[in-house]
Amino acid sequence: MPQDVTGGTITLSNIGAIGGKFGSPLLNLPEVAIIALGRIQKLPRFDDNGNIYPASVTNVTIGADHRVVDGATVARFCNEWKNLIEKPQLFLLHMR
């Protein structure tokens, strides 16, 4: 229903669920941002010693209303989100 997708501030679009790797999401005004998540892929990566290892990697694309939020804020959000995804135990540090 249209009323079910209105009144939010941010949209998460999981294009990975249909096999998509990358998207260019369009902002749904008056929302502040939209995030497209690609499918998780196993790709080769290098550790600090130059050894190759398999890593689970996904593309994340964010579109934001620059009247409300600037690119530096979005970059800080991405860095924090990446940190929490890679180290989920950090979520538990705030629980009592």
Image (cartoon, rainbow, N blue to C red):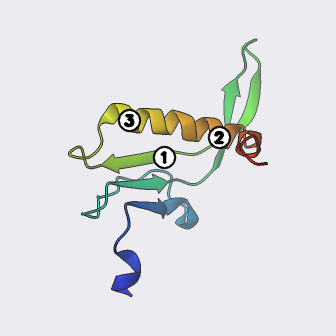
Instruction: Farthest residue to the top: give it.
Output: 49
Q: Position of residue 38 (x, y in %)?
A: 52, 53
Residue 95 located left or right of residue 80: right
In this view, 2 is above or below 32: below
As drawn, the label of residue 73 is 3
The reply to whether residue 21 is visible in this rendering is yes
Residue at the (41%, 81%) spot, across then down: 4
- Amino acid carrying mark 2 in the image: Leu
**Quarter occupied by residue 87:** top right
Label 2 CA crowd tier, 10 Å (few <14, some 14–19, many 20+):
few
Q: Which residue is mark 2?
A: 84
Callout 3 secondary element: helix
Q: Position of residue 7 (x, y in %)?
A: 34, 72
Q: Which mark's residue is nearer the viewer, 3 or 1? A: 3
Residue at the (46%, 62%) spot, across then down: 13
Q: Position of residue 26 (x, y in %)?
A: 29, 58
Q: CA distance from mark 3 to mark 2?
A: 17 Å
Say whether marks 1 and 2 touch (CB < 8 Å): no
Q: Earlier in the sequence, mark 1 or mark 2?
A: 1
